[in-house]
Image (spheres, helix red, strand yellow):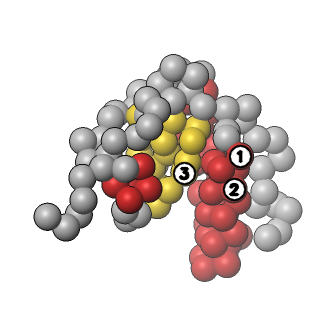
Amino acid sequence: MSSSVLPRELPGNLSRQAVDDLIRILRRSERDFGVAVARRSRDRLLARIRSIEDGRAIGHPRQDVRPRRPTLFINENPWVICFSPETRQIYRILHGARDFPAIFGGPSAVP
């Protein structure tokens, strides 16, 4: 990944897994769509992450998951950012098409 796509400084509310998710997203974005798209993706995600960090963003619970710890979700299409409502720590940054009940626990997709 080119150094121009990597964030110079990461927000302090990212878990290790969220950092890994962000890097994976940016690498794939650059590989599949080019540097310009990867930079726009980076800027959008970092802006949303910072709005969670400073309390401006308000997430929502999901009825299809049962996380082990309090978790809210906020969309930054096509991604979903998962975070703690109390500490505002980002747990994960996932593509919205992922199987959230399989990741976080929840009702089985098959009855």
Tell me if residue 61 comes above or below residue 88 in the rendering: below
Q: Position of residue 6 (x, y in %)?
A: 78, 57
Element at badge 2? helix
- Residue 39 in view of the camera: no
From the viewer's perspective, is the residue at label 3 or at label 1 nearer? 1
Quarter occupied by the C terminus: bottom left
The residue identified by callout 1 is: 16
Mark 3 or mark 2: name the one nearer the start of the chain. Answer: 2
Give the residue at the far bottom of this rendering. 32
CA–CA distance in space, label 1 to label 2: 6 Å
The residue identified by callout 3 is: 93
Image side of residue 62 versus residue 26, left or right? left
Q: Position of residue 93 (x, y in %)?
A: 54, 51
Q: Position of residue 35 (x, y in %)?
A: 71, 70
Numbered tag placed on residue 94 in the rendering: none
Name the residue: 49% across, 45% down.
Answer: 81
